[in-house]
Image (cartoon, coloured by chain):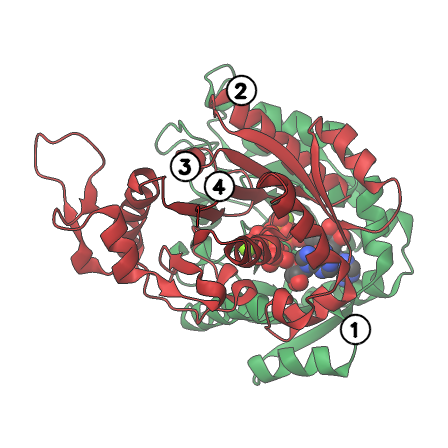
Amino acid sequence: MGRPGRLRVAFVGKGGAGKSAIAGTFARLLAREGHEVLAIDSDPMPGLAFSLGVAQSDAGIPDDAVVERVEGEEGPRFRLRPDLDASAAVEAYANVGPDGVRFLQFGKLTGHVAQLMRSQHAFRQIVEELPDDRWSVVGDLPGGTRQPFFGWADFAEVVLVVAEPTAKSWLSAKRLTRLAREDGTAANLLLVVNKAREAGDARLVAEMTGLTVAAVVPWDEDLAEAERRGRPPIDDAPNSGAVRAVASLVADLTGGT
Amino acid sequence: MRIAVVGKGGSGKTTTSAVVARVLGRRGLSVVALDCDSNPNLGISLGVGDQETERLVAMRQALDEGDEEHAPEWDELIDRFGSDAPDGVRLAVVSRIENPDPGCPCCGLSPEQLLSSADFGDAIVLADLEAGIGTLTRLQDATIDAVLIVVEPTPKSIEVGSRAYGLVRDKAVGRVVVVANRIRNDEDLDRVRQAFPDAEIVAVPDDPAIVAADRSGVAALDRTADAPAVLALIGVAERLLPVAS
Ligand SMILES: Nc1ncnc2c1ncn2[C@@H]1O[C@H](COP(=O)(O)OP(=O)(O)OP(=O)(O)O)[C@@H](O)[C@H]1O
Ligand SMILES: Nc1ncnc2c1ncn2[C@@H]1O[C@H](COP(=O)(O)OP(=O)(O)OP(=O)(O)O)[C@@H](O)[C@H]1O
Ligand SMILES: [Mg+2]
Ligand SMILES: [Mg+2]
């Protein structure tokens, strides 16, 4: 049986736009299509684990898996221990979630900034070096404009900018788009309009951001309720309009197979 | 008097900051609203409009690129990187830039350093912080007088709020108020109460008027001053008045 073509996407957008809710659902649906999916949460604040349905952990990449780079060697200050390559690190440290999705949390901010730094470098190395003939990657990036394009989104060929039909949300999307362009990101930037309530919402956000709409996810009470209970939308609200909209996004990006 | 507003992304920090700042301004207090977010949106919620909000973002960007003079003094900072908002509130954008001049008040000080070192005179400073708890973890003890922790009744949001609550309790902050935002029913409020059994909690209802104001990019206080969520947020400001004056 042929393996479906891999896909690497990153979700960005204003705080609370719905990146984690959509990314978690997207990852699960992609896995059901037969992809081997690594879902990564690069936000030190919790989010993706809840929407994906994996046990959340503060662990991230353990300290002993990360070493300081030897003097003279090119690259950032920390790296994975030399006997660990990206695939081995995923095998060792990514949790296995429902539908076989692997989940990697880059470390929670508990006050130990130094530890977080180490984890962050290792994390970045993993997404850069992960063999791309095997894994599909779904990245949930931190909200706002501070981090996404400083290397975090390099692994992605499609960056999905999530925006609500509100001024703060589309301004944030516009700033992200500008940053991406300035950064020379090769990725294709597409718009996911979330929490759409009115007929004109998608067109409005598309106009305000200048981005092409890849999906319109409706405001959905059932999804909101699932999230309030701390349950993955795909398990608690599988037939909701929001989950169906994410399913058609997955279908579109995987070529409808 | 220094007030910080914290919480998960999208929990309603900016919405809360804007109403509280303007209500304190209406009481005749001198208020500086500091937008500490690297994705600054406070201008929109205060009601200065999207163009003025974007102008302030462009100022920060020009500073970053070396095209804008630095502001060596605090007063000059709020003068040059700020804007007048309604009700006498002065908005200033102090978000972090990529190429700061170390120690310079307008760019080389992180929000937490600014909060602990700048001389605010008798102004009330209300800081709308970046999502998460990063700034709080680095904040010096006793440099703020009140913290508003904004949480939605979801485990994600409560998780961030609880971490923030733990930190502020350790840091000798005067007053801590948990703003339970987007509450639809008793069950929602109970979720927040259970997570913060000892805290002072103010419930703010889930209110389409907030979304409607945000869609048009105007202040909820200007569009629907009598909406239930706006009234509840005015109540939050009033709770702070005894601390503030
Ligand atoms: N289509 C939708 N309909 C209703 N509610 C939604 C929808 N999408 C997301 N939400 C709700 O919005 C809130 C924020 O969602 P989520 O945590 O996924 O956002 P985020 O962009 O990941 O936030 P952060 O910036 O903090 O990471 C959650 O309570 C979620 O349940
Ligand atoms: N009480 C409420 N009822 C309904 N919607 C609300 C309420 N409070 C906030 N919202 C909605 O939540 C969205 C996020 O609010 P806001 O921008 O204030 O959050 P924030 O915490 O400042 O986000 P960020 O992390 O991006 O800074 C707004 O677009 C608004 O529509
Ligand atoms: Mg998230
Ligand atoms: Mg905000």
Chain where mark 4 sits: A
Residue B38 position within the rendered picture, expressed as x and y whole percent measured from the top left: 53, 39
Q: Are marks 4 and 2 on the same chain?
A: no
Give the Cα separation between the discs numbered 4 and 3: 10 Å
* Residue that appears at 38% across and 57% down: A104
Colour in which the image shows chain B: green
Q: Are marks 4 and 1 in contact (CB under 8 Å)?
A: no
Tag 3 residue? A155
Mark 2 lies on residue: B62
Give the chain of mark 1.
Answer: B
- Residue plotted at (81% across, 52% down): B211
Q: What residue did someone put label 4 on?
A: A7
Same chain letter for marks 4 and 3: yes
| A60, above or below A178, in the image | below
Q: Give the x, y percent position of residue A11.
A: 55, 44
Q: CA distance from mark 2 to mark 1?
A: 43 Å
Which chain did the image draw in red? A
Q: Are marks 1 and 3 on the same chain?
A: no
**Which is nearer the N-term, disc 2 or disc 1?**
2
* Mark carried by residue B206: none
Q: Give the side of residue B183 with respect to residue A154, left or right.
A: right
Front in this rendered view, residue A145 or A87: A87
Left or right of residue A129, residue A158 in this image: right
Mark nearest the camera among 4 and 1 is 4
